[in-house]
Image (spheres, rainbow, N blue to C red):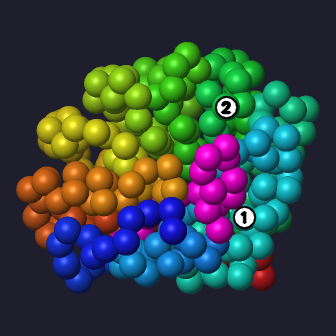
Amino acid sequence: MPYPVGSSRLWVEEMKYIDAHCHIGNHLEFSLTPEELLDFMERFSIDHSIICPMGSEIILDVRGANERIGKLVNLYPDKFTGFGCTNPWYASAVDEIEYAISVLKLQGIYLEPSLQGFPVNHELVYPIMEKIAQLNVPLYVHTGTPPYALPLQVADLAERFPEINIIMGSIHSDFWFDVLPAAEKASNLYVDASCVFVETALAEIIDRCGIERVLFATDFPYYNPYMVFSRFSLLKLSKEGKESLFHANIERLVRIGGGMA
């Protein structure tokens, strides 16, 4: 199994849990099958997951990646909601967004600038941002890997496109301390808290930006879920705060479930 065996979360509480970001596919030393993800969700009492592609296919086979995610959403509509990917270097980048959202019925777009090789706030990205705005879906950006997708670069993009809800995801590098000033610069930025390593920093983000802009996510299989849940367990949240963090916030941003008819 790609995670340690043992008890699930560090606490037991009756609540809906929606994982705002995880991956299915293959990427160097990481891989995850749909069956492994479903088993993980059962072990950790996660009701629903937003799935994204991973690895070389988001560079070399965007259409294949999106169609695979679309098929999984249709196969497990009660468990998975899909985000499609596009590569802004391709002439077909805008058309691929249209296909992913309008045809495959995916519910958002995923970019990984550090792997795809472009500065996230470069004008190269503007045409796909305009299409995302037209389709009224959120954008998820893998953030924190220099030099292409640092938090303040994502904030710059968010300020240029205030009509788009942008999720700063996988804040896993030494640049986590830029997450708070980035979120304060642009109110349309949301924080995927899966990889904010220091719980005091996460608590400060919640205090200064509001818990409604923080999303529960595991970024599985890249990170140990026990570390993710232990970090959340250290936050002193009310029942209403937990409901916002664990499911209500992402439900406001994304149409959960669905797929092709």
Q: CA distance from mark 2 to mark 1?
A: 19 Å
**Residue tagged 2:** 115
As for residue 140 lying within the magenta part, the answer is no
Coordinates of residue 243 in the picture (x, y in percent): 25, 68
Q: Residues within 10 Å of mark 1 (few under 14, many from 20)?
A: many
Q: Residue at x 45, y 41 (%)?
A: 170
Query: Left or right of 26: which side holds 45?
Result: left
Q: Which residues are magenta?
A: 17-33
**Residue tagged 1:** 69
Coordinates of residue 217 in the picture (x, y in percent): 41, 56
Which image quarter: residue 44?
A: bottom left
N-term-proximal mark, 2 vs 1: 1
Q: Amino acid type of disc 2?
A: Leu
Q: Residue at x 41, y 35 (%)?
A: 172
Q: Residues within 10 Å of mark 2 (few under 14, many from 20)?
A: some
Query: Left or right of 83: which side holds 65?
Result: right
Query: Left or right of 228: which side holds 132?
Result: right
